[in-house]
Image (cartoon, rainbow, N blue to C red):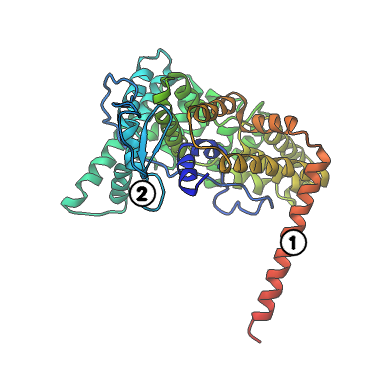
Amino acid sequence: MTPALRRVWWVLSALLLALVGWFVRSGMVGVDATPLVVVRPVPTVARTDAPVVEATAPVPTESPEATPHGSDEVELCGGLWVKLKDDGNVDDDDLRRVVRLPEARAQLIAALRADASELARAAAVWLGLMGSEADRLATVGAVSGCNGAECEASRQATARFAEGRDMLARMAATTNDPQVYALAFNTCGQAQPNAGACQLLSADQWARLDPDNATPWLFVLAQAGQRRDVAAQNEALFRLSASRRSEQHFFALPALLLTHLPGDEAALPAALILATEAIGVEAAWTVPGYQDLVALCRPTALRDSNRRQTCGAVAELLVERSDTLLDYGIGIALGRQLGWPAERLERLRGERAAYYESLVTKSADAPFPGCAEVQRELATVERRVRLGEVGEMREWVAQSGLQREDFIRAERASQAKEADAAASAAAAAAVSAPR
């Protein structure tokens, strides 16, 4: 495949790796020596005023045979043609025009609003917050404090976003659905107490709605740490250890998109782009209180037998019963602090690294996105929705034909390579240091 065509494929298949793209923030890098792969689309912020109209799925206006196409165009699934820029990359504006993205988004919002479920209606509000790159840049401009007539668009975009966010927060304030609450809570993010209707939400209320889920208790833990409330921290840590699962509800929105988007061939590229945008926004959600958790389970604290037992239960939960690979990685980090056997840690890291590599190789070597390829990627999303990231990784491991010794061997080789590189860097620094 030529570099230009591969670029087009990466645009349309960004969803695949976006779901793998988890990250460790604010000093957490280095807790686990194995780096996490980070592939994250730029989040779009945006409009709450997107019109809800009856729109048919995008279809080509002329047949490929009847319309001449230049050397600067490539064909997508459904007989749609998109232009390439001079550098061989896809023209994003032309791509969105060709697939009729605004109409596809409006159609999806209308379908979600017509759904009887509260989560679907909340998702319709949330989807209205996503808009064009121009909207995103305008909002960034407003936040940065620009003034004057040229910034009016920025102020309007910010106001539209706040209005939609507050609508979602008010829905969550009266819900009994933990997925609706999680959606609003994460959309509000780090909003201050006076940030509109977001002040109606709290990690404690999310935990009350979903008490067996570790994720809200991680937020409770972090907030207790900010208040320096040791008793509340200990209670949250205990509730974490007693949780039955760790579920961030990260896949609730992709699942809704899969069930409400049209399935005809011409609509598939727009479906994949919309799903990619959704994942891009979700990837910017607030990360739970991992730093506080790792600090409470540091080796010195583990001298207390009760704390060791509690932290051990949390580590097992995150490794064995979580739905994201970020949770899984934090569980491995805790296991290392707890002194888990080296072979277990090497196997866990080795499986994760091999799984990441399989995804990178699959995307890099994928053929140009015909309908079969796009449908295959959407099927991959459906499987990840059903199994979660960790479940899908375990399924891949079981089907890989590799044995536990293979993963351990590969991980040891990787660690040795990193150690050699670190030693070489240290030696070079010592030579160049002033005497």
The outermost residue toward the left is: 149
Q: Quadrant of residue 400?
A: top right
User: Image height check: is 116 above or below 134?
Assistant: above
Q: Quadrant of residue 127?
A: top left
Q: Residues within 10 Å of mark 1 (few under 14, many from 20)?
A: few
Q: Position of residue 35 (x, y in %)?
A: 64, 50
Q: Amino acid at mark 2?
A: Lys
User: Image height check: is 146 above or below 61?
Assistant: below
Q: Amino acid at mark 1?
A: Ala
Residue 29 appears in the picture as rendered:
yes
* Nearest the eye: 292 or 139: 139
Asked which secondary structure carries label 2, the reply is loop
Asked which secondary structure carries label 1, the reply is helix
Q: Position of residue 379 (x, y in %)?
A: 55, 25
Q: Which residue is mark 1?
A: 419
Query: Which labelled disc corresponds to residue 85?
Result: 2
